[in-house]
């Protein structure tokens, strides 16, 4: 049962073949047997989850009308607050903090009776591409435990790939949902910016951060998307418009007559051969399914990475100022005679890891008077140019596509001392955040040279998220016939974890 899709689990629940309590317990058993190796979870809420599951079973027994994902377990990235449950953001500085309220994402999950198993590991404050920047140790890729599961949401992606949960929530500022999905053979979606509320999402870079759904199939992802999305007056950037019809699109998967634009600038050299091969093959499958493949050019994407590493650190240097040893979690050096400033300095010195400090310093520099126009100002101009590139490309194509990332999962430790090499992972995912549009990664097969999964990225215009689900569903179906089974079943080590 734990290897089924959420839709299959929901059908078993509806038919009375299993209870939500039993299904939840099966997942806790799985976690108990594999998570010492995978380390996807930072915290498990066993009692809370089982109580929530019992309440759903009771509602079902009474014949109440339930949401499509009622009673299905989920893994929550530890950057979203849940009342009374530890929230660390992968940082020592928040150790021991229990938030007094629910994020809107959590409220929506609870209103849909989705069972929250616990909080997943992540790069500290979502800064990273490998989950190695967690203060609580790395997460391991279930395909090969010596490799990274991507980041920053490596815990959520690994939990899905290791069958520890059929659903997960991630957040994506520059690729943190899509890149982990790509390297673990799972599906991840960054919705349109403003499509899912940021209320209770601990801010890294507020103009880029977006929470989104993760699962093992396109339809499961769509169902979770509809459960968490929608207008929220508590988030001033939340879009007040109906949620795109993503479930209907995922069920249809009809791409006949659709124009699919290959972004020239995201289709050059620098991709691993197996990543290239799976991308080209996926384009052929989409063409066979009736889509028209065209080429589009987005010349300013070349500057996206550089601009992102000015904008994101700038916003982070401001957002992370709140961790001042007074309000949340850790406090160090609070001895007689110590000034508030000394306590603050010491706490931030001890509480933040290297990458977070690097970003705060970069951002503070970029925002400082005298440098503001040259760095932050220029980056904002580039951001506008990138948005214009997308606008023009979307006049020629309904969706745009690229490989999600340049390589398959690399070894733990391989890039941890080389920030630039790490940053390059997000070369194809960052433009999406800069423009606030939607992006999906789904598995397009495994690379011949290493047998590891490859991600295919689909990008759709603002609030046209249903288009990426349409194309994603079509590709998923075509790949299923080609490979004869879901891509995740091609992972040899998953057997070893069983
Ligand atoms: N890897 C990128 C970074 O380190 C993106 C992170 C994210 O999307 N949260 O900033």
Image (cartoon, helix red, strand yellow):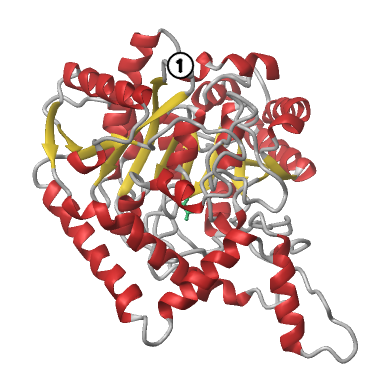
Residue at the disc numbered 1: 486
| Image location of residue 453, percent across then percent down | 46, 24
Where is residue 107? Give x, y as percent. 57, 54
- In the rendered view, does 41 fall on the left or right side of 429? right
x and y, in percent, of residue 100 in the image:
69, 66
Q: Nearer the viewer, residue 153 or 15?
A: 153
Q: Is residue 445 left or right of residue 117?
A: left
Residue 115 in view in this figure: yes
For the N terminus, which image quadrant? top right
Residue furthest front as drawn: 417
Q: Residues within 10 Å of mark 1 (few under 14, many from 20)?
A: many
Depth check: give the residue in front, 158 or 336.
Answer: 336
Q: At 64% from the left edge and 14% from the top edge, which residue is drawn? A: 495
Quarter holding the C terminus is top right
- At a point 62% along the width and 46% down the height, the residue shown is 132
Q: Is residue 264 above or below residue 14?
A: below
Q: Secondary structure at mark 1?
A: loop
Q: Residue at x 49, y 25 (%)?
A: 7
Q: Residue furthest top?
A: 484
> Which of the two residues, 325 or 72, is positioned nearer the viewer here?
325
* Residue 346 position within the rendered picture, expressed as x and y whole percent measured from the top left: 75, 76
- In the image: residue 367, left or right of residue 164: left
Please identify the quarter of the rendering in which residue 473 is found. Answer: top left
Above or below residue 464? Residue 210 is below
């Amino acid at each position: 049962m734990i290897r089924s899709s959420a839709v299959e689990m929901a059908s078993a629940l509806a038919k009375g073949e299993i209870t939500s309590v039993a299904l939840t317990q099966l997942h806790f058993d799985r976690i108990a047997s594999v998570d010492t190796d995978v380390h996807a979870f930072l915290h498990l809420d066993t009692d809370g989850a089982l109580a929530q599951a019992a309440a759903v079973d009771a509602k079902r027994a009474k014949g109440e009308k339930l949401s499509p994902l009622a009673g299905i377990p989920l893994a929550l990235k530890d950057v979203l607050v849940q009342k009374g449950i530890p929230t660390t953001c992968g940082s020592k500085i928040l150790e021991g903090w229990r938030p007094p309220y629910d994020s809107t994402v959590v409220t929506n999950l609870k209103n849909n009776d989705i069972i929250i198993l616990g909080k997943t590991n992540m790069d500290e404050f979502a800064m990273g591409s490998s989950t190695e920047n967690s203060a609580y140790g790395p997460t391991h890729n279930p395909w090969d435990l010596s490799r990274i599961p991507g980041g920053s949401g490596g815990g959520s992606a690994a939990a899905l790939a290791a069958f520890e949960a059929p659903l997960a929530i991630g957040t994506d500022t520059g690729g943190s949902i899509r890149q982990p999905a790509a390297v673990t053979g799972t599906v991840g979606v960054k919705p349109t910016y403003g499509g899912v509320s940021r209320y209770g999402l601990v801010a890294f870079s507020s103009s880029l951060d977006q929470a989104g759904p993760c699962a093992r199939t396109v339809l499961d992802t769509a169902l979770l998307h509809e459960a968490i999305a929608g207008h929220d007056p508590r988030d001033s950037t939340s879009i007040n418009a109906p949620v795109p019809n993503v479930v209907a699109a995922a069920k249809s998967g009809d791409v006949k007559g659709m124009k699919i634009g290959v972004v020239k600038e995201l289709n050059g050299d620098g991709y691993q051969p197996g990543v290239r091969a799976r991308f080209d093959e996926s384009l052929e499958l989409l063409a066979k399914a009736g889509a028209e493949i065209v080429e589009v050019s987005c010349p300013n994407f070349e500057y996206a990475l550089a601009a992102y590493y000015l904008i994101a650190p700038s916003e982070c240097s401001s957002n992370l100022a709140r961790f001042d040893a007074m309000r949340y979690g850790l406090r160090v050096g609070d001895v007689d005679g110590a000034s508030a400033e000394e306590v603050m300095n010491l706490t931030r010195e001890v509480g933040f890891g290297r990458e977070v400090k690097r970003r705060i310093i970069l951002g503070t520099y970029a925002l400082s008077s005298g440098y503001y126009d040259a760095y932050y100002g220029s980056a904002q101009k580039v951001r506008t140019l990138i948005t214009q590139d997308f606008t023009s490309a979307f006049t020629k194509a309904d969706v745009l596509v690229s490989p999600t990332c340049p390589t398959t999962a690399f070894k733990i430790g391989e890039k941890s001392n080389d920030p630039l090499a790490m940053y390059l992972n997000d070369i194809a995912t960052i433009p999406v955040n800069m423009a606030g549009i939607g992006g999906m990664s789904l598995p397009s097969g495994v690379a011949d040279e290493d047998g590891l999964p490859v991600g295919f990225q689909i990008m759709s215009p603002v609030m046209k998220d249903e288009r990426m689900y349409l194309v994603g569903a079509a590709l998923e179906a075509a790949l299923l016939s080609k490979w004869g089974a879901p891509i995740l079943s091609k992972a040899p080590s998953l057997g070893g974890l069983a």
